[in-house]
Image (tube, grey):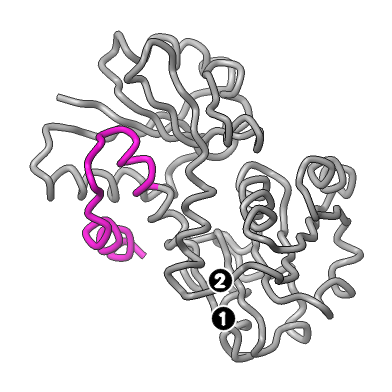
Amino acid sequence: MQIFGLLGNPIGHSLSPVMHQAAYSHLLMDAKYIAMEPEVSDLEEIITEAPQNGISGLNVTIPFKQDVLPHVQPNKLAKRIGAVNTIDFSGKKPIGYNTDVAGARRSFEHHDVSLSGKNSVVLGAGGAGRALAFMLSDEGSDVSIVNRTESKARSLSESVPNSTGYGLSSLTELLQDTDIIVNTTSVGMGTDISLIPETSLHSDLVVMDAVYRPLQTRLLREAKDSGALTIDGAWMLLYQGVEAFEIWTGKKAPVSVMNKAVRSQL
């Protein structure tokens, strides 16, 4: 039996186990997906001993996407971003990937959104924020990174081409000339709040929220009411999982099955 899993803390909210297990069942794979909630001090031991414990691959979620970097060999993209969310143990050394990039890109593609030449605002400068900022920049967007701690946003912007870092106090002004808004913070997760003033939303915007509990966050509800195109967080969850599944197994992921499994829980 192949064993895959998830590292995060807390992970009670995660739908990765349901999504991946649905894929294994559909393809009649002898595999299971387990969830682990370690302390940061446990990560080195878990990753080092994973192969001898029969683990073929691990996903990594909040708050460990940067903490695992010293314990894996990141591929070029993950190293550039500075965050890992997928680890593959099929080689001599554990290889770290960042499938959040593919997850975000495919989410926009699924909704027929062109990114080139657009002005984008990314809320948050953590693991997901880093992935989104690099992806949008690579696709030809000018990126404004907004973070509660302005120095963190500015630090990230120094690594991301065509980007600038700001604090929250600049947000309202930035939104006056924005085409795409992406929330990668936890704001809205289990709470009915939004960082974006409702008065800044309009029908020419594309608004994506990485939060998927609830599926329709206050940000997405208000954006939809304004006529904006909205992309919920389950799409990014789905497509980053699809990418991880294909890295680990070499099989084509059953995307529709995985999508149905995720949305059945929301």
Residue at 77% x, 86% y is 199
Instruction: Inspect the image, locate mark 1, and give the three-letter code of the amino acid beneath it.
Output: Arg
Task: Decide: few, some or many residues near mark 1? Use Cα within 10 Å; few <14, some 14-19, many ≥20.
Answer: some
- Classify 246 as above or below 230: above
Q: Which residue is located at x 55 percent, y 81 percent?
A: 229
Question: Taking 169 as reference, is 110 left or right?
Answer: left
Q: Closer to the camera, 160 or 195? A: 160
Coordinates of residue 258 in the picture (x, y in percent): 27, 56
Horizontal side of residue 259 vs 190, given as left or right: left
Asked if residue 97 lies in the magenta stretch, the reply is no
* Alpha carbon separation for disc pair 1 and 2: 6 Å
Mark 1 sits on what residue? Answer: 221
Image coordinates of residue 221 in percent, x first then y, are: 56, 81
Q: Which residues are magenta?
A: 241-266
- Disc 1 + disc 2, Cβ < 8 Å: yes
In the image, residue 58 lies at what x, y percent?
Answer: 39, 29
Label 2, on which residue?
217
Instruction: Please tell me in which quadrant of the rendered image residue 186 appears.
Output: bottom right
**Residue at screen point 27% across, 45% down:** 20
Answer whether residue 251 is magenta in the image.
yes
Q: Determine the image quadrant of residue 116.
A: bottom right
Would residue 91 be found to the left or right of residue 26 on screen? right
Q: Identity of the amino acid at label 2? A: Thr
Q: Secondary structure at mark 1?
A: helix
**Between 103 and 208, the one nearer to me in the picture:** 103
Q: Residue furthest left?
A: 28
- Above or below 223: residue 137: above
Provide the major secondary structure of the magenta segment: helix
Up/down of 203 relative to 149, above or below: below
Disc 2 element? loop
The residue depicted at 34 percent of the width and 31 percent of the height is 5
